[in-house]
Image: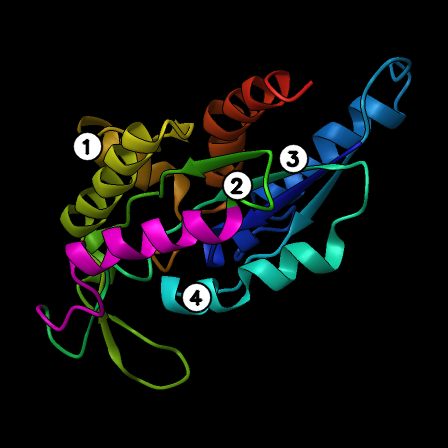
Amino acid sequence: MSNIFCFGASNAFGKCSVNGGWPDRLKQYLSEEYYGKEAPGARPYLVYNLCISGEPMEYLKQRVVQEIQFRQRPGRDNIVIFEVGGNDAIAKDTPDGFVSTPEAFRASLEELLDLVRPLANQVMFIGMPPHDESKTMPAVHHATGQKLYMSNERRRLFEGIVADFCKVHNVPFAPFITSSLESDWTQKHLWRDGQHMNEAGHAWLFDQRVKPAVLQLLENVK
């Protein structure tokens, strides 16, 4: 038996989706494989959606170890999957009021991996979806009224940092989408706020990116 711990922010959590984000869809898929009619011989997995909407890396680093330790059990492998960077790539109040620098984000990735590697059999990172910039440059926070600037250029920069980091550390990485497909994808797969995925977007991410990458990862821990 293996634990699969999933960390991310609002899209991974499943905001604007009836059926949840990619961790929830992964749980449903693996549960059907184990408990369904074709179950004999399948390996059980416990999937935990530990995502928090709006969470930057600084907050994630404070809780990640305890989240895993509270749920680990003897004899179980621990697989940890991250979708990070979206809330570190934004700017607040002004277009250049960035909450993090590329250098600070890269350093946070190093710290995060150092925290989880002693607890994990496998670690993996997933890329982040693009936005509809006509609605996110700026967006206005529904509760505070604060202006938030979320550009796809900045998101690509931070996803590139994750990709390079994973290559250096030999950690699996599932990129989200190429910039050449960005415009067409955002028109069909985002909710009306331009930030979060709709049902089609969540389904696309799971089917096209998460499921193939995670199934390959699980083959490596058998």
Identify the secondary structure beneath mark 1: helix
First along the sequence among labels 2 and 3: 3
Q: Is residue 95 above or below residue 192?
A: below
Q: Residue furthest bottom?
A: 144
**Disc nearer the start of the sequence (1/4):** 4
Distance, label 2 to label 4, CA atoms, is 15 Å
Residue at x 74% of width, y 54% of height: 71
Q: Amino acid at mark 3?
A: Leu
Q: Is residue 77 above or below residue 118?
A: above
Badge 2 is on which residue? 81
Relative depth, front residue between 182 and 98: 98
| Marks 1 and 2, how far apart at CA | 23 Å
The residue positioned farthest toward the front in the image shown: 118
Q: CA distance from mark 2 to mark 3?
A: 11 Å
In the rendered image, which residue does mark 1 sit on?
179
* Residue 26 circle label: 3
- Horizontally, residue 23 falls left or right of residue 213, namely right
Q: Which residues are magenta?
A: 96-116
Q: Give residue 51's quadrant in the image.
A: bottom right
Name the residue beneath numbered marker 4.
55
Q: Position of residue 55 (x, y in %)?
A: 43, 66
Mark 1: amino acid: Ser
